Image (tube, helix red, strand yellow):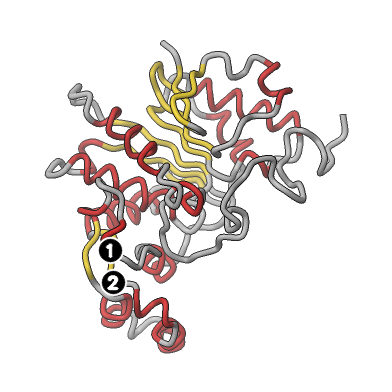
Amino acid sequence: MSSTVNNPYSCRKKEPTFTAHPDFYKYNSTKSCYFRRGAVALLSGAYCNVENTFFRLFKQNDNKQKKILIIGIGNSQEPFSYLASIKGILKDKPLKANLDLHVVDLQSEPSLQKLKQSAFSDLFDYEVYPRFAKSSFVKESYSDWLAPKVQNEKNSHYLLIDFIQNPKVKACHARVNDEIFDFVRETYGNPQKARWDSRVQDVIKEYPDRNFDVVSANNVLPYIVSENEYMETLSNIVRTLKPNAYFITDPYEFEKPVKDSGILNPLTQVYKGIYQKKV
């Protein structure tokens, strides 16, 4: 069957098939905002479901390092958002000892400047952070954190002028703490953990069965136009999940052909867009 914008496996449609915040498809912030569906989930109060998922995972007291795969990092929204919540759950426990993070993205590895931009939150009111994530942010302005460190970098002057003159940036007064920032930066620079300029359709085949405790794919699967690749990719995601592991994806229902295929049979929906693999 040929691939068209109208095939049931592609969400490249004029209108989404669900009711969502108007910014759902056009949100292009350079700063973290509780991942791309955060424009929907946070405003609706549903981000607590994501935090509850991580709470379940990291409060098992089994002393095992949790392995998480994030497919499609956006502007590092998922990595920084997830780690902010996870660190809040872990408290004094170090991220490195408890989390093995892997990422796959179509884009190239972001520059240090881009990563610093993404480390700031779009939630200008510090008091509205989710319960676990809030403790993972430190109060600091973008220009104060960046300015001393980019003086010798190309075009740093123009970068600073652009951001300092932006009234929203003046309101940004919180970034992820150094442990989270360094953890993400090290992950991105590790070719064993980060796959850049890569299609998930190709990379997901390489991971072994029952490999991840969480696989996250927000605003990713809808852009796989080929129905065969869509089905194969989804099947491989389910295959790579450990028993009792979680699949975090877009907060809307899968199309009927996907449900009828049986690919989702090993999964149980625990929240909208969040599934758990059965034992």
Q: Residue at x 39, y 77 (%)?
A: 169
Is 1 above or below relative to 223?
Answer: above
Residue under label 2: 173
Q: Check residue 126 in the rendering and tell me which mark sits there, or answer none.
A: 1
Residue 210, percent from left and from top: 44, 19
Residue 107, percent from left and from top: 57, 56
In the rendered structure, the answer to whether residue 245 lies left or right of residue 205 reads: left
Is the C-beta separation of discs 2 and 1 under 8 Å? yes
Q: Amino acid at mark 1?
A: Tyr
Secondary structure under the numbered disc 1 in the rendered image: helix
Q: Residue at x 42, y 64 (%)?
A: 31
Q: Where the C terminus falls, by quadrant?
A: top left
Is 173 above or below relative to 161?
Answer: above
As measured in the structure, the alpha-carbon distance from the residue carrying label 2 to the one carrying label 1 is: 8 Å
Q: Observer-nearest residue: 22 or 98?
A: 22
Q: Residue at x 37, y 51 (%)?
A: 81
Q: Check residue 142 in the rendering and tell me which mark sits there, or answer none.
A: none
Secondary structure under the numbered disc 2 in the rendered image: loop
- The answer to which of marks 2 and 1 sits earlier in the sequence is 1
